[in-house]
């Protein structure tokens, strides 16, 4: 079986143990950014394979050598928001989020092994696909980030769940700064399970196909190819104490002030700081609030909360403005709805967690 959806290849690969269901995100020029059609195709394939006894495991990868998936197709979201009268919910935008979160949750709860080859760029919605997989592989070329602060969104796709499970204050820090992670960082914050050299791809596929297809056998096969990421040690790990100190203030103005005082001497932290200081002030509050509210939530409660938050984001002006400034007109001068975090009240934050009336 091989089906070509729009920007998506779905096939079944014969192995010694039966079949592997394979999904290839196939939009390399757009760094495999997810559209609604791609999400629908993935959902159909996953639903079909769930009950097909011949398919023992699922493999998901991106086409081309630059990216697994650079996130959701936010340019389409922008056009949906712009085409909708003020105050009305942009249906295409909310449909995208609802279908994306359903697919992400499907991967989190899938009864068969799901292997994600997270080579190259893995951002936003790409992390959403990868986060719930049972076998998450990064390479020396992997670069992960949740950069929603730059467009006036917040880390969604189940981030309220996985940011809560990171060491120390890494979850808040990554959500507020959009800082980039390498393979060692991804392993440290539990967004990946294995690091494999990108050149070992063919060999790894072969070794997996020679197993019995069980969760344990696939784990063992990947571990045999596990590469030492020692030469690119985790920057997050080495900065953990500093990160915890920076995120400690409960007052958001004090937290921002702490970042403003960083010097250029620490290149990595200083770079991460730029996104926080230039990014959407409301996002900083949303990151802290989503992590706090989701602390004791179930996975399905997290996705339900995020759908409410994302619907509110498409109704509020910052998201459209952030996409305009970064990706449409590319002037990199977003006019956020507030000038600084000092202008934001608890009531303004609370609005993003209120169910909208259709």
Image: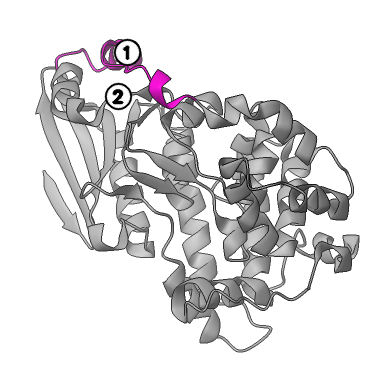
Residue 27, visible in the rendered structure: no
Give the residue at x 47% y 35%: 132
Mark carried by residue 223: 1
Q: Going 40% across and 27% down the picture, which residue do you hit?
A: 111
Q: Position of residue 209 (x, y in %)?
A: 15, 20
The image position of residue 6, as x and y in percent, is 23, 63
Region of the chain picked out in magenta, as a range? 210-233
Residue 21 visible, this orientation: yes
Magenta highlight on residue 241: no
Which residue carries the number 2 mark? Answer: 196
Choose top left, top right, bottom left or bottom right for residue 247.
top right
Q: SS class of the residue under badge 1?
A: helix
Where's the C terminus, which quadrant? Answer: bottom right
**Is 90 above or below relative to 260?**
below
Q: Is residue 329 left or right of residue 319?
A: left
Q: Rounded to the nearest whole Å, what is the CA distance between mark 2 and mark 1?
A: 9 Å
Q: Position of residue 237 (x, y in %)?
A: 59, 25
Residue, x 78% and y 73% (percent of image)? 338
Q: Quadrant of residue 21?
A: top left
């Amino acid at each position: 079986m091989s089906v070509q959806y729009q920007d998506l290849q779905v096939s079944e690969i014969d192995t010694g143990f039966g079949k592997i269901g394979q999904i290839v995100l196939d939009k390399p020029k757009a760094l495999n950014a997810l559209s609604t059609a791609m999400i629908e195709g993935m959902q159909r394939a996953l639903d079909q394979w769930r009950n097909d006894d011949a398919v023992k495991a699922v493999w998901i990868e991106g086409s081309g050598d630059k990216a697994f998936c650079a996130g959701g197709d936010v340019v389409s979201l922008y056009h949906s928001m712009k085409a909708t009268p003020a105050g009305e919910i942009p249906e295409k935008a909310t449909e995208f989020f609802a279908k994306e979160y359903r697919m992400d949750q499907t991967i989190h709860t899938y009864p068969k092994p799901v292997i994600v080859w997270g080579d190259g760029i893995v951002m936003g919605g790409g992390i959403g696909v990868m986060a719930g997989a049972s076998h998450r592989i990064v390479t020396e070329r992997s670069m992960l980030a949740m950069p929603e602060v730059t467009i006036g969104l917040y880390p969604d796709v189940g981030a309220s769940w996985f940011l809560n499970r990171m060491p120390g204050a890494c979850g808040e820090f990554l959500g507020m700064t959009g800082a980039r992670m390498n393979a060692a960082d991804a392993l440290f914050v539990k967004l990946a399970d294995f690091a494999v050299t990108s050149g070992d791809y063919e060999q790894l596929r072969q070794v997996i196909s020679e197993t019995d297809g069980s969760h344990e056998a696939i784990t063992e096969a990947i571990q045999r190819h596990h590469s030492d990421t020692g030469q690119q040690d985790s920057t997050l790990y080495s900065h953990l104490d500093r990160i915890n100190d920076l995120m400690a203030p409960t007052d958001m103005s004090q937290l921002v002030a702490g970042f403003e005082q960083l010097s250029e001497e620490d290149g990595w932290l200083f770079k991460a700081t730029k996104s926080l200081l230039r990014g959407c002030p409301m996002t900083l509050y949303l990151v802290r609030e989503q992590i706090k509210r989701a602390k004791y939530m179930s996975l399905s409660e997290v996705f339900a909360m995020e759908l409410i938050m994302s619907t509110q984001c498409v109704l509020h002006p910052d998201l459209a403005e952030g996409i305009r400034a970064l990706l449409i007109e590319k002037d990199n001068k977003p006019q956020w709805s507030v000038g600084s975090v000092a202008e934001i009240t608890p009531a303004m934050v609370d609005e993003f967690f209120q169910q909208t009336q259709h």
